[in-house]
Amino acid sequence: KRQNLHEYCVRHPSATYFLRVSGSSMEDGRIHDGDVLVVDRSLTASHGSIVVACIHNEFTVKRLLLRPRPCLM
């Protein structure tokens, strides 16, 4: 039986998009070049969350660290 991954991965269709990863900067987060990420903009990021950020008009995937001071790693 075929499975519809959209049913399992998308909780908020109007706030969800897919992003293909290019590069290896997040391999420690088990995200590899060529992976497809399911991004839900309706979720609130917290300390340690993996986030998609727009820096200098380019998207990047990083881990959000809020302590001891906010930064993207």
Image (spheres, rainbow, N blue to C red):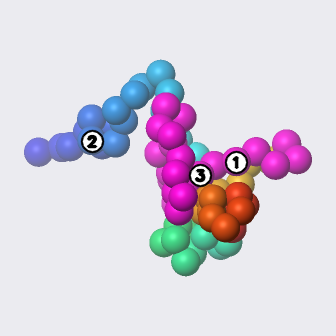
Q: Which mark is nearer the camera, 1 or 2?
A: 1
Tell me the quarter of the image containing the C terminus. Answer: bottom right
For label 1, count other residues whose C-alpha is less than 10 Å away and answer few (under 14), some (14-19) or many (20+).
some
- Residue 13 vs 50, above or below: the answer is above
Q: Residue at x 48, y 72 (%)?
A: 30
User: Residue 69 or 72: which is nearer the viewer?
Assistant: 69
What's drawn in magenta, residue-wise? 34-57
Q: Quadrant of residue 66?
A: bottom right
Tell me the quarter of the image containing the N terminus. Answer: top left
Where does the image place residue 26, in percent across and percent down from the top left? 61, 70
The residue under label 2 is 8
The residue under label 1 is 53
User: Residue 73 or 46: which is nearer the viewer?
Assistant: 46
- Secondary structure of the residue carrying tag 1 is strand
Contact check, label 1 and label 3, Cβ < 8 Å? yes
Where does the image place residue 42, in percent across and percent down from the top left? 49, 31
Callout 3, which amino acid? Val
